[in-house]
Amino acid sequence: MWLPLLVALWLGQSSQRLPFNNYQTFLEPRDGEDACHLNKPVYFQNRTYRFRGTAYPGDLAVPLRQGQFEERNELGGIEWSMALERQESIILGTERATLVRFFADHLAGTGSASHVLVMRCNGSRLEVVFEAEGEGVRAVYLPHSTLTISAPFWRREDSHASPSEVIHEEYRWDPSGHRFVLAHRGQRRRR
């Protein structure tokens, strides 16, 4: 009687350990060292970013120039290419903010990584109030301060090219706490 339950639990946990299942979110606001310039769109294309998670680039500082970054290998070839893919002005309650999405492609290997940041001004400093990362992460900002995130989820039997499930999360801006909170999380099979 207990054996099927233990096997099911083990299979569920082992699918989470696949290297592709690297989706993470960070809701704790993080002050930046940079001055805040939300009104200058090119500002986000020409600054250095540090991401919190383990997906590429990990703890590596990423100095974007004109929205691009290339990490070269020891032979001078491009190992990774990263680009600021999307930049969107949004409103958090009554405050202006910016949602940015990055895409990193492993040109010398396989795989990719996506990063989503929501940034606002906290006084005169730039503050990251939301961060999500992983392979294939997507973000949509809806009216009334709702941020929806989706990310693929691989089961143990899935190939890298065909994840069988999708994680959907909905975050709402809490103006009194000056942060996003998770409002809903679901997981469903892909069609």
Image (cartoon, rainbow, N blue to C red):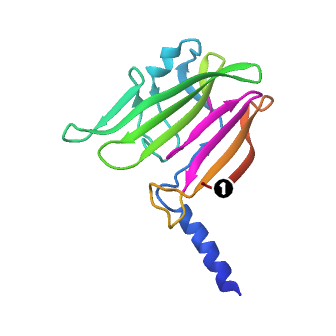
Residue 46 visible from this viewpoint: yes
In the depicted structure, whether residue 72 falls above or below residue 8? above
Compared across the picture, whether 161 is left or right of 171 comes to left
Q: Residue at x 50, y 21 (%)?
A: 44
Badge 1 density bin: few <14, some 14–19, many ≥20, Cα 10 Å: few
Q: Nearer the viewer, residue 174 or 19?
A: 19
Q: Residue at x 46, y 43 (%)?
A: 113
In the depicted structure, whether residue 165 falls above or below residue 43? below
Compared across the picture, whether 144 is left or right of 15 comes to right
Which residue reaches farthest left? 75
Amino acid on which disc 1 is placed: Arg
Residue linked to disc 1: 188
State the image coordinates of residue 33 (x, y, percent, origin top left). Answer: 53, 24
Q: Residue at x 38, y 22 (%)?
A: 65
Residues drawn in magenta: 128-153
Is residue 4 covered in magenta?
A: no
In the depicted structure, whether residue 51 falls above or below residue 155? above
State the image coordinates of residue 79 (x, y, percent, origin top left). Answer: 30, 41
